[in-house]
Amino acid sequence: MAKITFITTDDKTITLEGTSGSVMQLAVDNSVPGIDGDCGGVCSCATCHVHVAPEHIEKTGVASEIEEDMLDLNDYSNERSRLCCQLEISEALDGLVLQVAESD
Amino acid sequence: MSNNQTKKRVCAVIGASHAGVNFAFSLRKEGWEGDIVLFDKDPVLPYHRPPLSKAYLTSEDGIEKNLLKSAESYEKENIHLNLGVLVSSINREDKTLRLSDGRIQDYDKLVIATGARPVIPPIPGIDMATNIYPLRTAEDVENIRHAFNASSNKRIIIIGGGYIGLETAASLKKLGGAVTVLEREERILARVTAPEMSNFFMQLHTQNGVDVLTNKNVVSIKPVNDVNMVVCEDGSEFEADIIVVGVGIRVNLELAKDAGLHIENGIAVDETACTNDKNIYAIGDCTYHYNPHYKRRVRLESVQNAVDQAKVAAAAICEKAPVYDTIPWFWSDQYDVKLQMVGLSEGYNNILIRKEESDGVKFSIWYFKDDTLLAVDAVNNAKAYVLGTKFIKGHNKIDQSKLADNSVPFKPANLLMQ
């Protein structure tokens, strides 16, 4: 079980609990605005872009090469950007805070 | 329109896949307070289709791991899902739907998202063949998995070397099948990509132990000793324990046609996804719509178009002013290769291939009409894909000699015409 908090682009805080699957699926199932997950979680659409809270980047690790490349020209990407379809829910992510990124 | 005005109204949706489901949730997001009622003949909670021929086929997961939205999300948004229910006709005068179980459903606004169905070609003997399946639904995958597990020889013949056929070939090979792809044309993916890309995928499959044979027009299927014998026009014969048919789709137009809606290679819609009846919209694979970027009408089989038209229709029904102006994109995963495509390459007159220095295979094909970039196919190269997207969107002129030179870093400033 992991509690994961999303801060939306209009500064609403949504805290959800998940046990398995991807963070993207958790967000989509709970209609978190700004997380669409159109491709179903295979890193093909970049519609699940989040910024990991600075103090939590150790929990998630940084973006993989394909995530970096997908966000390469994104105006809102930074060094804490992740595509959250690539984050698997586990106890290790408990307490994670993610800021939903603006979209281009 | 104020929310009060939408409160007592009903929006009905025929078809609950990527287009219909995304539409329903978008409509709520846009502020529709009335009923939203979805119908689909598939009895299973709506699921992602692209993985069916890819990761889902090779996993042991049930479809519940692959849902578009959880069951609770429909409840939470008060979206009524009627699964396993067929809509048998649309009455535009009364604004009602007749359902297969005899019920009548009223609507104020109707959205047709009926998608498409696989073509089963009229090959003599195909009706009598055993273990023959298309691949478009979760049930199709269940059937293929079941037949595969029950078969000792696992000789698979795939009719059709398009994306569905090739993805299925890669998946069943991974599971240990003896897979042969029979393609009627002289190359695989002939309809959708350049010969160079066809060659690449031909080699990829061959290296992975799949036989891909071209110029193989299947003319009959005969039962021989409890297996299927697949016979081609050139006289060659192939034994098949399982046959998967992937030769394309037919758009589900019957309801729209019978209701007198305007049909033209799909249900004709305007830039807000509205049909010639102002209370009826159509979205997704079943539509023939205008793409403002390419300045022509197109029919697209894609998740991107389903989702984007869903958003546009939802906004239009809530009397916002949406604009459909997206560049089509697609993807395919086969073995360890990720192909990402952006744009529409039809009408290209030259291509440029850029290969990156890399441990693995990594390249991109850029399709031009004169100096206009139309489309990019990127293999294991998301950077090329996003760069191509940006250039196509921006109508940018590109320095083709720099683009072809892999020592010039992939940055917009390096590649734009000065």
Image (cartoon, rainbow, N blue to C red):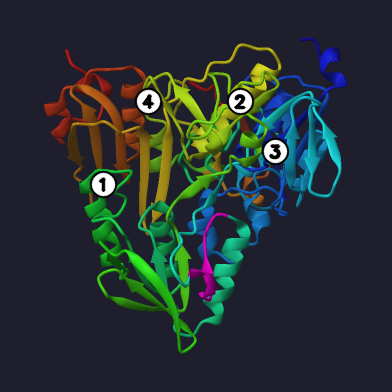
Q: Could you tell me how far apart the alpha carbons at marks 4 and 3 are, in whole angstroms?
A: 38 Å
Amino acid type, callout 1 = Lys
Q: What residue does disc 4 label?
A: A73
Q: Are the residues under badges 3 and 2 in a single subunit?
A: yes
Nearer the observer: mark 2 or 4; the answer is 2
Q: Could you tell me how far apart the alpha carbons at marks 1 and 3 are, in whole angstroms?
A: 41 Å
The subunit letter for the residue under badge 2 reads: B
Percent from the top left, x then y, of residue B300?
Answer: 46, 36
Q: What residue does disc 1 label?
A: B362
Q: Which residues are magenta?
A: B126-136
Q: Could you tell me how far apart the alpha carbons at marks 2 and 4 are, in whole angstroms?
A: 24 Å
Helix, strand or loop for disc 4: loop
Residue that protrudes farthest toward the bottom in the picture = B225
Amino acid type, callout 3 = Ile
Q: Is residue A52 visible?
A: no
Q: Counting residues from the N terminus, which is met first, the one under dot 3 or under dot 2?
A: 3
| Marker disc for residue B311 | 2
Q: Are marks 3 and 2 in contact (CB under 8 Å)?
A: no
Q: Could you tell me how far apart the alpha carbons at marks 1 and 4 are, in whole angstroms?
A: 19 Å
Identify the residue shown where x is 27% and y is 22%.
B412
Q: What residue does disc 3 label?
A: B14
Helix, strand or loop for disc 1: loop
Q: Are marks 2 and 4 in contact (CB under 8 Å)?
A: no
Q: Is residue B390 above or below residue A22?
A: above
Helix, strand or loop for disc 3: strand
Nearer the observer: mark 4 or 3; the answer is 3
Q: Is residue B52 visible?
A: yes
Identify the residue shown where x is 60% and y is 47%.
A22
State the residue in front, B218 or A79.
Answer: B218
